[in-house]
Amino acid sequence: MQLGLSVSDSDVSSFTPLVVLELADDTKAEAITWLLNRIRDKQQNGGAELLVNQLLFPAQDDQKPNPNVFLVGSTLQRLLNGAEDVGLFKEFQDGTMRGFTYANRESFKDFNGDGEGVLSDAECQYIIKHELDTLRAKNEEHVPGYPKLKLYPGKSVVRRLQSKGVLIQYFPLHNKEDLKRLSFSWYKKFKLSFQPLDDIRHYFGEGLALYFGFLEYFTFALVPMALIGIPYYLFDWEDYDKYVLFAVFNLVWSTVFLEVWKRCSATLAYGWGTLSRKKAFEEPRAGFHGALGFNPVTGREEPVYPSSKRQLRIYLVSVPFVLLCLYLSFYVMMVYFDMEFWAINIYNENPDIATSILLFVPSIIYAVVIEIMNLLYRFAAEFLTDWENHRLESSFQNHLVLKVLVFNFVNCFASLFYIAFVMQDMVLLRQSLATLLITSQILNQVMEAFLPYWLQRRRNKKVHKRMRRLMGDKELPLLGQVQLETEMNTYLGTFDDYLEQFLLFGYVSLFSCVYPLAAVLVVLNNITEVYSDAFKMCHVFKRPFSEPATNIGVWQLAFETMSIIAVVTNCALIGLSPQMKAYFPESDTQLILIVVTIEHVLLAFKFILAFVIPDVPKHIQVNLAKLEFDSLEALKKRRRALGR
């Protein structure tokens, strides 16, 4: 039986609401009743054993509210059992991080009394999401009321409803008090200090906290480059004999930067209990489809799609499309150079203030076109990757990242490579790099910070006005909060944020030796990025579900690949310098051999450094080994007790 909650109820819910679940407004009544019963039913009966209540919005003149909005919560004991099911790690009494078990709950450091504070809101919401996602069909052949919406035994009910549009969205609610405290310590006061990463992790989860940890680390790591770049720019940058030293420093910096980050991320992940956490078995994506078959791992009946068909789609459609887009990118680049030469000719004929300003116009237009092309390509890449029909979300993300990185790298850096190594015009390279970097940063700030803020502010005003018109002076914080958050934009993950940092890292590591202020500009950009991203997460987007993360994933490989390309690029720039050419005035072949040798030595140094610097600090390795040893000893004792 559904529990409808009218707006006059003083106690809007009999439990603490953690997750909002919104079904389509025309969802059949029998489907709603069936789903709510499944959510409330006992675990032994195949239910999620969660608490769920309906939230009824008051009637409005201008629009009909959706009656199918539900609040989901849970009892504390169910959450503690769920923490064991999802494999959460918590700090033990001896200071080590161990997998939480309900039987040994009192042996964990933060467990006091009934264990009210042992789980954060983000962890509770993650547990509820896990329970909803793993709510599986039993013997139902279809969703009640929808004969064509087939169900497969053992398959996720929620994912099925989501893929067919019956379930519009489900998201975690913001906690107003926690959000206020986090906002104050995070971005409401300007301070040159570290971010509250533990508080961010506590509220948003490890995945987002690791992104902000990386953003902070990247910004601080750029400070030495910026401090060296400022005097270099002021005194020596016109003397191209001097950029050799800056290029060498650039090479060492990019290698050490990434190797030390691995240790930092391992330290953060260990402290948060995700470093030794086993990866959960991945469920199929909501949009995955195929003929009915059996999963060879689980033995469950589910859609199966032949990998050969997927490979055909990738190599016969996706790859040619990406190559076509790369060709268009090169074509636009050549148009840009035509514009550049046109502007230079006008300046040479009549050098004055107007024509000197005109010199920057082609680069600015090209930078805007690059951003537009990146945006359009991103939509196309998402469509193609979804059409390839990847079974797992991780596979989907890896293919999407590969497509987007290849195009963005070529689109953003091809013109710089052409200027540096074909035209060999260092003055134009410096000008183009500066213009591309500054213009892209301005556009990113407008698109990522100011525009979303302005749009969300308009939405907030509409919702508050609607609430005041309906309720007068009466306060309904939960009702208004839910209505406001259902209309907020959904945060699509850290993909775009990492992509932006990847491109900035490319601008700094590839060509900054000819424009030393690149690091300074990126530092300034990242300082504003911290505050704008923090504000967006707190007030523009719906609260995302916590995602356990050990590291930054495939992006670590992307940054390392960029650093290897940087070695080749900087060595080539050193070879083109007048200083190096003076040593070999009559033998280009000998110069090339020397540069290639230096490049190989530096690459060898880079890989040796990566091998020498352990990814995980020694004390954490010891703690992990100790935990593994204790687990094996406990297993032996259990077997002896059972007489095996």
Image (spheres, rainbow, N blue to C red):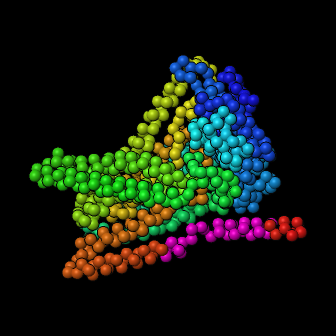
Image quarter hosting the N terminus: top right
Residue pictured at 62% horizontal, 70% vertical: 618
Q: On the image, which quarter does residue 277 sit in?
A: bottom right
Image quarter hosting the C terminus: bottom right
Majority secondary structure in the magenta region: helix
Residue pictured at 20% horizontal, 54% vertical: 338
Residue 512 lies in the magenta stretch: no
What segment is highlighted magenta in the picture?
A: 608-634
Instruction: State left or right for residue 346 relative to residue 520.
Output: left
Measured from the top left, where is residue 247 in percent x and y?
A: 35, 68
Residue pictured at 21% horizontal, 47% vertical: 357
From where the camera sits, is residue 238 visible?
no
Measured from the top left, where is residue 551 in percent x and y?
A: 56, 59
Measured from the top left, where is residue 298 in percent x and y?
A: 69, 57
Residue 629 lies in the magenta stretch: yes
Instruction: State left or right for residue 517 relative to residue 470.
Output: left
Seen from the viewer's position, the closer of residues 289 and 187 is: 289
| 24 versus 279 height, above or below | above
| 477 versus 294 height, above or below | above
From where the camera sits, is residue 521 visible?
yes
Seen from the viewer's position, the closer of residues 139 and 606 is: 139
